[in-house]
Image: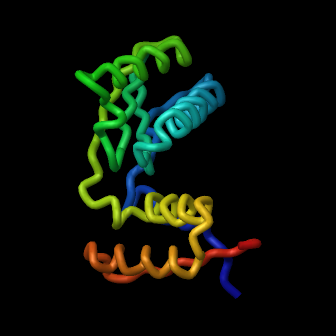
Amino acid sequence: MGQKVNPKGLRVGIIRSWEGRWYADRNYEELLHEDLKIRKYITEKLQQAGVPKIEIERAANRVKVSIHAAKPGIVIGRGGAEVENLRKELEKLTGKQVAVNIIEIKKPELDAKLVADNVAQQLERRVSFRRAMKQTVGRTMRAGAQGIKISCSGRL
């Protein structure tokens, strides 16, 4: 019988890259908790922007945060005001110099996290789960996916 392997752990370094690119000998735990705080803050603040991936790079006393967003206009704001506000908040949170980089997702219909979030939002709006799933499958296949499998469980 085969062993169950974490799919992300299996693919990291081969197909996908790490979401946190840094190395620490001594205070690894503190930096890891700082990464988790940054990710939690960004996902809560930018929930409407569709943020499936946050990459964090560290060098000495600097932190570079790359935010992949389906709607970068919400993240950037008018004249870059929202990005500047986000950068200041992250600097206050970490106590280090932070650089924020926003990367637009060209086809959000092909991103698994965004597709799942879309189905979840529809279910929260009390849309029939069969309709939500069928629409999502159709939309994703029209966008150019080779295949899609959705499972929805729990009390619906």
Instruction: Give the residue at x 31% y 77%.
Output: 145
The percent coordinates of residue 96 (x first, y second) are: 47, 13
Quadrant where the image shows the N terminus: bottom right
The percent coordinates of residue 27 (x first, y second) are: 62, 23
Find the residue positioned furthest to the right. 155
When the figure is inspected, residue 142 is found, relative to residue 86, above or below; the finding is below
Quadrant where the image shows the C terminus: bottom right
Q: Which of the colour schemes (rainbow, by chain, secondary structure, one colour) is used?
A: rainbow
Instruction: Give the residue at x 27% y 25%.
Output: 78
Q: In the rendered picture of this protein, how many numbered marks are placed on residues?
A: 0
When the figure is inspected, residue 53 is found, relative to residue 11, above or below; the finding is above
Which of 104/3 is in front?
104
Residue 111 appears in view: yes
Which of 9/41 is in front?
41
Task: Give the quarter of the image for residue 44.
Answer: top right
Instruction: Give the residue at x 67% y 77%.
Output: 3
The percent coordinates of residue 20 (x first, y second) are: 46, 40
On screen, residue 17 versus residue 126, left or right, reads left
Find the residue positioned furthest to the bottom. 1
Which of 53/21 is in front?
53
When the figure is inspected, residue 26 is found, relative to residue 32, above or below; the finding is above
Residue 62 appears in view: no
Instruction: Give the residue at x 34% y 65%.
Output: 109
Task: Give the quarter of the image for residue 93.
Answer: top right
The percent coordinates of residue 14 (x first, y second) are: 38, 62
